[in-house]
Image: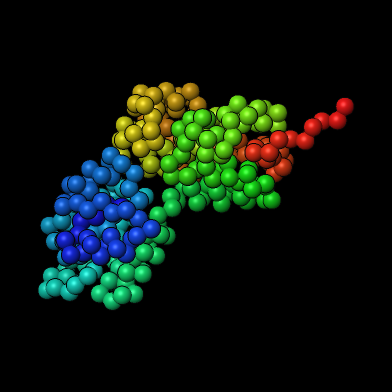
Amino acid sequence: MTTVLDPAERARVDAAGVGVYRALHRDSLEDVFRDLRERPIGAVLVSVCRCQEREASKIATMVREFPRVPAVALLSQLEQQTPRAVLALGRSGVRTIVDVRQPTGWRELRAVLVEGRSDDIQRLALARIAGDLPGAPPDCQQFFELLFRPRTAATIRSLAKALGILPSTLMSRFFRAHLPAPKRYLAMARLVRAARLLENPGLSVASVSNHLDYSSPQSFGRHIRTMIGLTAVEFRERYDGEGMLQQFRAELVLPYVAVLRRFSPLSAPPPTRR
């Protein structure tokens, strides 16, 4: 989370967020824009007392260019200009204001940020796949959870390590089950996350490639062309996050429902009888 707060508010926000979020405190909205373009940010928290009317256009631009990043206003004190600031925030597109003048407000702030912390495309993907694969083994569910977590593994080696299995063993079990290679699942899941990020007009293709740990924008572009035969610009125009998730399910889940509902990637299959 990145913030623009008064010094007195920073310490209290940090204390309220222990175990929930890590705040990057900035001095200006220009710094917040830089964070949004250069690193994964889960939310933006702006103090009402720092939101002068002249800042309204910048906040409106932020909300418009980064619609998938929740913007939250913090009200810690009432001043003469507070009503005008609150109205300006509303006109700028900020829909959540948390009043922390009472202790319950800090609990509300935690709840708001916890609700928005988990990436929405991750929640949507796991909900859709759980509906596709009711009763699937826990380790099959774990495999999909790792594919869509906010910091997705970039290679089969790192994915296998997270699963506690050798890469060769993981690939062999998919092959023996007549499923697409796990590398294909991983590559397509990264494109789902990329499509969601590219819904933010303020993020360039280069920024998204950096967010998703591609070695370069050119590498990201080659990956898109190899996987689905589009340029990065065409990919951005054709797919949003949900559309790419539907493509993932259509190619890698729905044709293999019967197999995946019994598939345990972390368990050796029973020996075949002779």
Residue 8 position within the rendered picture, expressed as x and y whole percent measured from the top left: 18, 65
176 or 84, nearer to the observer:
176
Q: In which quarter of the image is residue 164?
A: top right
Above or below for 52 versus 126? below
The type of colouring in the image is rainbow
184 or 110, nearer to the observer:
110
Q: Is residue 202 among the parts visible in the rendering?
A: no
**139 horizontally vs 104: left or right:** right
- Which residue sits furthest bottom? 102
Q: Which residue is located at x 48 percent, y 30 percent?
A: 155
Q: Which residue is located at x 55 percent, y 48 percent?
A: 126
Q: Is residue 15 among the parts visible in the rendering?
A: yes
- Which residue sits furthest right? 274
Q: How many marks?
A: 0
**117 horizontally vs 122: left or right:** left
Q: In which quarter of the image is residue 204?
A: top left
**41 horizontally vs 255: left or right:** left
Residue 197 position within the rendered picture, expressed as x and y whole percent measured from the top left: 38, 41
Name the image quarter holding the C terminus.
top right
Q: Which residue is located at x 56 percent, y 39 percent?
A: 163
Residue 97 position within the rendered picture, expressed as x and y whole percent measured from the top left: 29, 66
Q: Which residue is located at x 70 percent, y 28 percent?
A: 176
**256 horizontally vs 104: left or right:** right
